[in-house]
Image: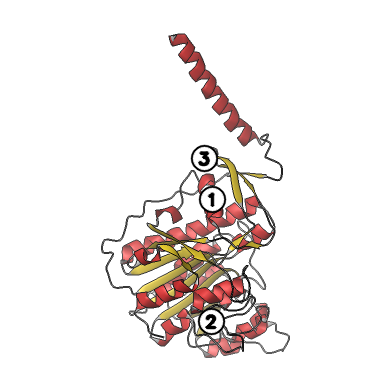
Amino acid sequence: MKNLFLIINLSIALFSFGQQSTYLDGNYKPEKGGSIYISEHQHVVDNIKPVSNPNAAIENVILMIGDGMGVSHVFAAMTANNDRLYIDQMPYVGLQKTKAKNRYRTDSAGAGSALATGEKTNYGSISVDDQGVPYPTILEYAAGNGYATGLVAACKITHATPAAFIAHVPKRNQYEDIATFFVTDSLDVFLGGGSDDFCKRETGVNLRPALEAKGFQVVTELAKLDGIKRGKVAGFFANGHLNAYPARGEFLVESTRKAIKLLKKNKKGFFLMVEGSQIDWAGHDNNLAYTIEEMLDFDRAVGEVLKFAKKDGHTLVIVTADHETGGLSVINGDIEGGMVEAKFNTTGHSSVLVPVFAYGPGAEKFSGIYENTAIFDKMMEAYGFKK
């Protein structure tokens, strides 16, 4: 009997090893319509303890948006990274509804505007009502109350999600019009791509002199960003969109870290929005490797923010999405081997609830299920602002 148990256990071990080896050798056959991703470089996730005083005054709010990030995206990245992310250390979790004012299925303009303004807008509109009247954004409220403000995006900075926090236009593709809103006293730091929308415009008007007149230091190389120690910064690191990860390097992590260093010099506090932009594009492409690589890059940026928030003690961190893209389903996986098998169900957006994760003082208020507009309301409450 003892030998029988030994044979059974050995057989199970060999079967498990064989399964894992098959995954790693690339011979595993996915289900029909499925894709396989095997991670080759997991990042280490440090332990982030809760803030020592959950009732501390809130001075800073950092909103991180994984564009197109659904629950399955988070779980796929978690599986690929040995079952651990920085995101999963955020103690409060909620779900938000994403629909636009005039459509059940939203886009980044409508959803981003809801997060930024607390108002539902039409599909494709950037922080305006049906008549084009602007809705004030959380960034504008913060600036108006003496806080520093910043935007970081892994795409061109005039794209829908970052635009929703500073611009007010009826159509999201009005990139040159959107660029004019960045020439403002309400914004201190913005880092991303899209220099052509500012400097090589169809109108022929170069906005760089206007930015410099507003006090912006214009930077076009990531290496030179580190040399700036204070003041307003406009960072353009691509003519159009930035490259996908890993070709763009550590832009998102380094830009997020730098934005925090610059903004925290304001003694009153700051507001910062960081977007993991290309999670969405990977979903549109139904490209699982692209999706997970972008998710892991975004999670590393989340790690930078959480480390700062833990040390600072007065920072509320919110990680959420504008909508889900691709209808992603995780079918199978192997945590030890970093293997994920998944399927996409659409090349467009889906309409499902998307996750909200929160950390720091006030984080408990982000639990539950609510409309995306409620995130604006909760941020306003955190700062103590009134409409």
- The residue lying at 27 percent from left, 69 percent from top is 56
Q: Is residue 359 left or right of residue 101?
A: left
- Residue 40 x/y as whole percent: 58, 44
Disc 2 residue type (three-letter): Ile
CA distance separating discs 1 and 3? 10 Å
Q: Which label's residue is closer to the chain start, 2 or 3?
A: 2
Q: Of 228 and 141, which appears nearest the observer? A: 141
- The residue lying at 45 percent from left, 56 percent from top is 87
Disc 1 residue type (three-letter): Ala
Are dots 1 and 2 in contact, CB under 8 Å? no
Disc 3 residue type (three-letter): Ile
- Residue 129 x/y as whole percent: 58, 85
Q: Mark 2 = which residue?
A: 166
Element at badge 3?
A: loop
- The residue lying at 65 percent from left, 76 percent from top is 124
Name the quadrant containing residue 183. Answer: bottom right
- Residue 210 x/y as whole percent: 58, 90
Q: Which mark is residue 335?
A: 3
